[in-house]
Image (tube, grey):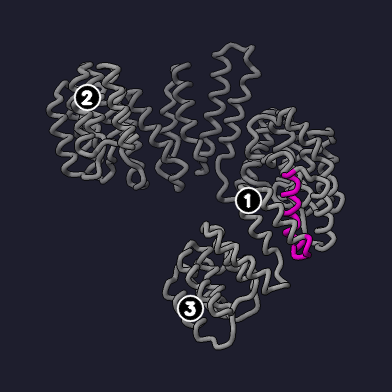
Amino acid sequence: MTDSVKAAFIHTLTEPEIAPQRYQNEFLPLANDTEFIEGCIQKAAEISEPNEALARIAYLLFLAGFEDRAMQLWEQAVERQTIDWWQYSRYMLALMQKGWYVRAIELMYHILDHYPQAKNTRSYIATAIEKQSPQQALALYREDFDEGRMTPGMMLNFACCLAGNDELALARQIVRKAYSQSENLRDGMFRIACILIDKQIQLDELIQPISDKQVKLIKKILPLLCEDADLGRLSPQNASLFLAYSALVDGIPVQNLIAERQKMAPLVTDACSIIANIAYFPRHHWQEAVQLYAVDYQRHQISPSSLSKYLYSLTFLNDIPQAEAVVEETCRRDPDFTGGYTTIAEAILDRRCILESQPATYVYTTHFRRAIEYLEKDIRLGRPSPATLPKMVDLINRYQHLTGDSCYQILLKDLPVSSFDKPDQVLPGIEDIVRELAQQGKLHQALKIVEETYPRHPELRGLYSSIAWHFHLSRFQFDEASQLFAKDREFGRSTPFWEIIEAITPVIAGDVEHAVDNVSRLYNENPSQTDAYSFLALAHWQKTHDTEHALALLQRDLELGRATEETKKRLIALSGFHSADRARSWLQRFTEEGLL
């Protein structure tokens, strides 16, 4: 923490009231410095004249989650009578959040009786209880409003509460009055509209096109949005939402939408893309969507999510050269941009449904190969997204199955797997690749990838063990599997899961007693390990169908306190193979003991 921030906070302890945003942003990390905070409290105690220092420290601590200490300081400030009404209001809200309603109400009346200039006192309580007790909240709002003790910003909250209680006409009047008292207020009518349609239709929630029912709702609330728009009271994002809703209802031409958006409010990120995301992209109106995305892209103000939709739309229009040009330009602009070609690949695969009239072999060969080529581009550029490598593995598997080509050679020969610098984007793909190679019988290729990636990515775990399981143990090559399990342990790369798998491998050869000894040793070495007997029981049962023996093994985890909820469920399920009554008995026991 810089000394300048600490000095600024100390300075504010005796200054006139400061903006709450400074507590929430600039000063919030200071709350974790106990020595500094205690020093500030000492300074506050040494100030002779009335001051709000203690209350301000309390507010900071409360925002940071140190609620008990904050309450102590607020009480001290109240006892000293050194705080003004807004600090009392903060304390009152804190009491409400803690559930100390009686004390909060007492404080509310204290503020009303002693501070005639206080604003929003009842309304703060109303805001806190509005969801649980809307009628009580409405009564509190009304009292503040009728007595002239409500700020314009709080009037918008009052209006929303009115709208939620079917008093729309009065709600609109309140918004207009708030606007008349403050030039800076925005979105008052829009907020009422959101109450009327239950919740705002958010672009990220749109999986399917907006339904006809939603369009009818939008049509009903559009006059409210129009009023905010005509008054210039829409915030930038909501200006875009208004035009998106207008496009859905009235079918306004795209060029008119763009022109209107440029006139209405500042062009922030996704100003036009929001319109596309809501009104056109979900309905597969690619041409209109592309025109809107292009505006934000050319202004360098498009979000990664909207950029992906832009690339997707271009690909669906079969304008792949333009999609490639957008990816290339974005790579030059943004060193952190990833997954551009992956988006093109995904769109190519989704688009193949239009070629269903072609033979399946043609569809698969053409589209899978093209998609793989684009995925390779992201990987070679060192710009894979989290979806790139898993998608590559999936496609290569399916493509190889259908054509007989050995596409894994592409992966091993051409793709610099060991050179990636973004582990969160590639590690899941590497794990998938190793598993798939082992399952396909490509032992040397799988081992090569592990040897290349382990030194570079300490986050990787259990890859040698995965090969042991998927390659060697499927061929009953126990010695070779044991060597690979040992390698993971040697490098500190084993996991609790693979330790269990290694311990129970003798059961594959029918040697359950050896596996039991291994599990016993594993538990002695690792007190936190769980469910090992459970895994052993299932493996033994799958091989022998000896339900009685398997149940006995499962119960060992229970007796040792090593059983997770999954083990208990397995015990109930396996008991069902013995008798329904036995399964019900276990279920009843676990339920009564609160274990399920």
Cβ atoms at labels 2 and 3 below 8 Å apart: no
Tell which of 38 and 381 is nearer to you. Answer: 38
Q: Which residue is mark 3?
A: 41
Q: Is residue 495 above or below residue 551?
A: below
Asked whether residue 96 appears in the rendered view, the answer is yes
Say left or right for 382 vs 577: right
Which element carries disc 1, helix, strand or loop? helix
Q: Magenta span: helix, strand or loop, mainly? A: helix
- Residue 195 point in image, percent of width and height: 72, 44
Check disc 3 and report its element: helix, strand or loop. Answer: helix
Residue type for callout 2: Leu
**Residue 148 picture location, percent across and down:** 78, 65
- Residue under numbered circle 1: 333
Q: Residue at x 75, y 65 (%)?
A: 149
Residue matched to label 2: 551
Residue 202 falls within the magenta-colored stretch: no
Q: x%, y% of residue 151? A: 75, 63
Depicted 522 relative to depicted 145: above or below: above
